[in-house]
Image: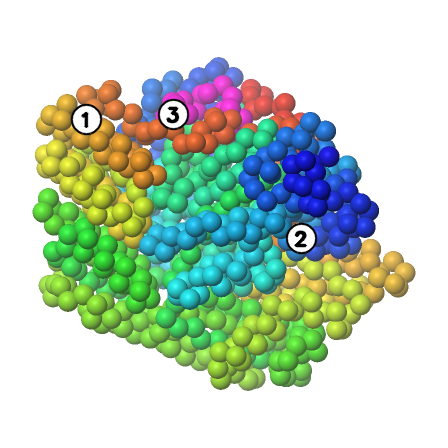
Amino acid sequence: MHAPATLDDAAALLREFAASGRTVGVTGADAPTGPAAVAVDETVSMRALDAILEYTPADQIVTVQAGVTIARLQAALRKERQRLALDPPDPERTTVGGAVASASYGPLRTRYGTAKDTIVGMTIVRADGTVARGGGKVVKNVAGFDIPKLMIGTYGTLAMIGTVTFRLHPLPQAVDDVIFPACDARALRELCAAMTQAQLEPSAVYAVYDGKQYACCVRFEGFPDGVAAQRATLLGLAKRASDESHALEPEHEVARTRGALQVKIAAPASLLDELHTHAVAPLHRALEDARAVVYPTVGVAFVSGESPDAARTLAVLEAARTWTESVGGTLIASEAPPEIRGAFDAWGTPPPAFALMRALKERFDPQRRLNPGGFVGGL
Amino acid sequence: MFADIVGAENCITDPAGLRVYECDGLTGTRVRPAAVVLPATTGEVARCIVRARKLGMPIVPRGSGTGLSGGALPVEGAVVIGTSRMRAILDVDIANQRMRVQPGVINLDISKHLAPLGYYYAPDPSSQSVCSIGGNVAENSGGAHCLKYGFTINHVVALTIVLADGEIVEIGSSVADPLGYDLTSAVIGSEGLLGIVTEVVVRFLRKPQATRTVFATFPSTDEAGEAVSEIIAAGIVPAAIEMMDALAIEAIVAATHVDWPLDVGAALLMDVDGIAAEVEETAEAAIAILRRTGALEIRNPRDENERQLMWKGRKGAFAAMGRISPNYYVQDGVIPRSDIARVLREIADLSARSGFRVANVFHAGDGNLHPLVLYDARAGDESERAEHVASEILHICVKYGGSITGEHGVGADKAAYMGEMFGDDDLETMQYVRCAFDSTQSFNPTKVFPAPRLCGDRAGVR
């Protein structure tokens, strides 16, 4: 394992590996797991590249090295009453580079979108060891092709992410969670539709499933008057809110991070009932110590647990994927025990534009040395 | 050449007909194309592309032709493929807030179509009543309200694109998190170099509960800039916050029906939108900041009509320059927001030194400047010298760590400046993307990249 101390050192390493034709994987704080963790000759850890390079609060812009953890970045921003509106799970260990390479996100996606909506610039190290820059350090910029956004969610298969420049948001002055302790999928969908109808603007909506019903958290953030008004409107819309503040955050975190099998399903948000019936419920039933959480406004579910019976789990996974892909969605096994991994393609059917993706891989990494086979369709 | 594909009436080859297509919004440079075709379907676009390739003609895509960087400027011998007949709204999915349209659909027509249902499409370039969504995709268009809501790239989720070999490809997805590389992000803002987009799926938004507009005047751009900084520092995210200097106000007042005062140094036009209670709270907080930072006058529009009039004034600012100058050169550059006052002073110095008046009307919230260099094309070499002043302004933007274009694109106009912002390695990396999509470089040659580069060169051992 190599842990370069500077971006130049990292570039020198990649040049050396290019010269000797060795394959390379890049990791954040921990050894990688999941389907992107393929066998490589050399592993480069970004843990020593953990500097916050430039932070201008007045411009709400920060540039960091890829090895900075999300938690440490947020702590630095909090001092200026700002934040990165991106909240992937396990922020203490998740690095900026890891979160960007895997296009990870958390409940704030409801309002603030994904890394694509916050990244304005990036420095990458290409397969040949060349350092290249894209974007800039201003929010608005259309000069040249958007290389930074193309790098998001590429799982280390196109280039090494060296530094990332983000646009930031002010820290909200008020935060309020409204909890609905007992909903089925239909009630969840109707709740979201009612909030849209009432022009409410929750910053996060997520619902934890316990095998019988969902408990839903609606988070409002902003200035005190607006947050209070949104709570009052929501309680007027849906009377079943709980008075007790039953914190769902720990359960959400567990569902997103634990379990030998971790599955993410994306489907049209309007098909939440079907997403529940065809994917979330059967997977939850098939697993031991099962957990599940859905982001109903986004149309995404995460199910995790232990697989007691590989054959049964596989059958359920296949059926869930068949349904999901039939409605234009995707099912990814982001973690899986070996007996599942060997029999079930972690990513699923390559998309219609796969030939273009292969052409990009061919241009960026013609010798196929960057995490080869670590992404959909063997990219 | 193409009449059998699109019909003779949609294939223009006569000099008079071609004249319309010699330039886009960048009117100073003109090149007559060999032909213009106006297909109506994705299939026709594909057949036109295959035919053009067979004839060895470069292909220049064109939307409404409102672009300000010469992105749709023809090249010698080219066929211009225009999307003006592709104006169908194909599907509206209210439950998922997605709409599939053809590329020639006008930006504002999307919001008009959605208005009765209580939804709208957020990106709002000033040209939104005439510019097409396909052109917006090519340029990653912004607008006044992208400060809070983002750009085209944040609101388009899927595309149908025809590639150089005529292949029709679906990229992105209406559903969250499509598998594989984010090709949609690669195509948005690629200025027509990767293919021709023939269908666009946009994400639309619920209208906010409330919108409040505030107009304020200041003794100079210094105080106005200070007000912008303080509003942002207070944690307020206005939907838009626009600045106009004295010269811009003079032109807008001359050209429209706004009754803005002429004896001021600068004005701000701000929208705050969202939850009604929050809009009240933040608008009042912003007004307090405007007062504290030295506002001369603060106006709240009496009704929606007056609000629309104020925005009409702002959005018509470029065209209004015609009232105070025979010609004007529109510049588009970006600087870090905290440097606005310093950069405006440098531009004022440049204006004094060069003798050219420069009007400033811009998106202050995100540091996106639009200096307008006023000149008279009939007077000697003024055109050239005005263009030189405009290019000096770009140098200033780059010096402050900004960008040579915030929303108008590189096109033909700024390709030569790309080398000031990016090194050879950065440009080579962008070229990888181009070559992956179109190794023949048939689409929009001479745009974006400062120097031609073949696609044969691959990354490898150095």
Q: In the image, which disc is placed on residue B168?
A: none
Do we see residue A14 in this rendering?
Answer: yes
Where is B231 relative to B202, above or below?
below
Residue at position x 62%, y 43% from top?
Answer: B39
Mark 1 = which residue? A314
Mark 2 secondary-structure assignment? loop
Amino acid carrying mark 3 in the image: Gly
Q: What residue type is labelled 1?
A: Leu
Quickly name the residue at label 3. A377
- Residue A304: which quarter of the image? top left
In which quadrant is the N terminus of chain A drawn?
top left
Seen in the picture, residue B304 relative to B35 is either above or below; the reply is below
Q: Where's the C terminus of chain A, which quadrant?
A: top left
> What is the chief secondary structure element of the magenta stretch?
loop
Name the chain letter of the residue that bears numbered label 2: B
| Secondary structure under the numbered disc 1 in the rendered image | helix
Say which residue appears at 20% left-offset and 39% top-offset: A278
Would residue B323 appear left or right of A183 to someone viewing this image? right
The residue marked by circle 3 belongs to what chain? A
Q: Residues within 10 Å of mark 3 (few under 14, many from 20)?
A: some
Q: Which region shows up in magenta? A: A360-379
